[in-house]
Amino acid sequence: MFESRCGVLCDSCERKEQVSCTGCLNMEKTFWGGECGVKTCCEAKELNHCGECEIFPCEMLSNMGKEQGFDPLIKIEQCRIWTNEE
């Protein structure tokens, strides 16, 4: 079962409670108030998560979080896992 559009494991996120995040699957807007391009893209294409996309992994997902010091490969691998479970 997928937990996000991008591959983040929301249920085990340490920051979830600190920022009052219920996960992008349950939120109309992001917890930070801005737009998430990945969320918007998946929802526009009616995809559950990025792993279902024909251009996976795209440039947007491959660079998501790099500026903040996060490794996007972890999310990409999780999307692959979810795709194989379907």
Image: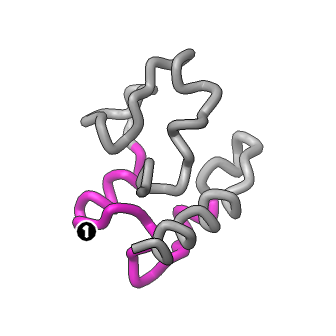
Q: Is residue 58 magenta?
A: yes
What residue is shown at x 46% (from left), y 72% (from top)? 85
What residue is shown at x 64% (from left), y 67% (from top)? 77
What stretch of residues is rendered in magenta?
A: 36-63
Tally of numbered discs: 1
What residue is shown at x 23% (from left), y 65% (from top)? 46
| Residue matched to label 1 | 45
What residue is shown at x 26% (from left), y 58% (from top)? 43
Q: Position of residue 60 (x, y in %)?
A: 52, 63
Secondary structure type for disc 1: loop
Q: Is residue 61 magenta?
A: yes
**In this picture, is 4 found above or below 19?**
below
Q: Residue furthest bottom?
A: 54
**In this picture, is 53 found above or below 48?**
below
The three-letter amino acid code for the residue at tag 1 is Lys
Q: Position of residue 56 (x, y in %)?
A: 49, 77
